[in-house]
Every structure is written in structure tokens, then in C-alpha cells.
Image: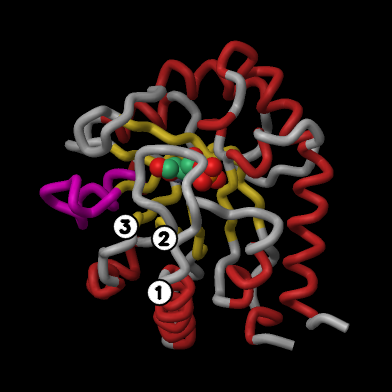
Amino acid sequence: MSDSAALSPARIAPSILSADFARLGEEVRNVVAAGADWIHFDVMDNHYVPNLTIGPLVCEAIRPHVDVPIDVHLMVEPVDALIPSFAKAGANVITFHPEASRHVDRSLALIRDHGCKAGLVLNPASSPDLLTHVMDRLDVVLLMSVNPGFGGQSFIPQTLIKLRQVRALIARHVAEGGQPIALEVDGGVKADNIRQIREAGADTFVAGSAIFGKPDYAAVIREMRAQIALADHGAA
Ligand code: DX5
Ligand code: ZN
């Protein structure tokens, strides 16, 4: 049995970046029916990252189709102006990259002031030290396991080391009376590596191409949960 047996229940957060945008309402309904816990919503601005995706109007359009939390991952610079727009559009969780905000503490506070859960996203080369002075402002830490900007990239194995470091930081924070903080991982997550990602301490798993790239979403999510259960209870 690994340390992950003590973790909170796992969440699967399909990234709609790999969904069929011509049928987005149907896609999100289907993936929730297939067992998704959150919908991961990737916002790219062709400035902070070299790609351009979707904004608050699309969030508002899918909101009535699902009753699970919408997890908005902002890959935009600057950050603050979009926070109220996404909160109004029905976002439940809003995360952003600290390099993209001039005042990280203020942006985190703004997210909570608008009634959403707040989180920071660390790129592959960013240090967990960035979290130290804002732990009480965080509901989520999202670790990028690819460089942000595109779906379908390969998982960067170094992320496993950072996951263990951040899991330890969160455990210490909670042991000292702090609020719980979700530990989310994003990029290259598949059924065949999710077990080791769980063992390293993640509790929330973003997966885009692994789910939307297959015809049977429920089968992929079932297999992911089975692999997570092996991490939690040990293999025979
Ligand atoms: C990348 C995005 C991810 C991406 C994940 O910048 O933040 O959410 O869609 O896609 P996969 O699971 O295909 O790596
Ligand atoms: Zn993302």
C-alpha cells in the first residue's frame, strides 16, 4: 500500500480541449454521464501561450448542460479582468499561472471574492516555492506535466518528484490547521500512467486526448479509476 491510500477520493477532470467543438454541449453531457467529476476548461490567449481557445461565452453556453464543477484553467496574461467574467459565466474553480499576474495574492483573493475556488498552476520548470506565502489563499494547486498550450503531449516524468514535494507541503499545511488543498495534474495523463501519478500524491486528474480521443469515454474513466484503486490499495 502506498501513502496515497490516505489521499482524498480521486477526481477525473476531462479537458474539453480535445472534445468535438462542433458538438460541445453533447460532448460535456456525455463525458459527465461517463463519470467525469469536473469539466476542465482550457483558456488560451495566444500571448501567455502560443494557442487560442475559448472564453467566458463558451463557459456560459455549456453551464446548463452539466451539474459538475467547471474548472477554468487560465493560460492568459493578464489574468484579473477575466476572473469576474468567468465567475459570472458559471465557473466553479479558477486557476492561473503566477507568472501571468503582476499581483498573485490579489488575483487569488479576487477569485474567492467572486465565489470560486482559487488555484495556482505551476509550469514544469516552476518551483513549488511559489506556493509558500499563499498557502492560505489556495483551494487547488495544479501542476503542469507538459508545457501549456496544446493537448496530446507526453507526460514529463519530473512532475512525479514535484507532486511528492507539493503533497508534503499540503500535508504540513493541513497538519498545522490549514484548509484542504486539491492537488491536480494536467498533461499527458493516461490510463497507463495514472497509477504512478496517484502514488506520487495527485487527487485530481485532467485528461484530454486520453478520454476524448477514444470512442468509449466511460471505459477510459473506468480504467483510470481501476488504476487509481490499485495505487490506493496495492496490486496483488
Ligand atoms: C494543456 C492543457 C491541458 C490539455 C491536456 O495546455 O492545459 O489541459 O488539454 O491534454 P492532454 O490530456 O491531451 O495532455
Ligand atoms: Zn489545462
Residue behind mark 2: 143
Residue type highlighted by circle 3: Asn
Neighbourhood count class around disc 3 (C-alpha, 10 Å): few under 14, some 14–19, many 20 upward: many
Report how far apart the C-alphas of labels 2 and 1 lie in the structure: 8 Å
Q: Picture quarter containing residue 94?
A: top left
Quadrant (top left/top right/bottom left/bottom right) for the N terminus:
bottom right
Q: Which residues are magenta?
A: 97-111
Spot occupied by residue 171 in the image (x, y as percentages of width and height): 48, 82
Name the residue at 68% across, 46% down.
37
Magenta run includes residue 225: no
Report how far apart the C-alphas of labels 3 and 2 lie in the structure: 7 Å
Contact flag, marks 2 and 1 (Cβ < 8 Å): yes
Residue behind mark 3: 123
Contact flag, marks 3 and 2 (Cβ < 8 Å): no
**Which comes sooner in the sequence, label 1 or label 3?**
3
Query: Is the residue marked 1 within 8 Å of ligand 1, measured from its CB?
Result: no
Name the residue at 58% across, 68% down.
197
Q: Picture quarter containing residue 66?
A: top right
The front one of 20 and 153 is 153
Residue 5 visible here: yes
Name the residue at 31% across, 35% down.
83
Q: Answer left or right for 164 relative to 212.
A: left
Residue behind mark 1: 162
Q: Answer left or right for 208 relative to 150.
A: right
**Which comes sooner in the sequence, label 3 or label 2?**
3
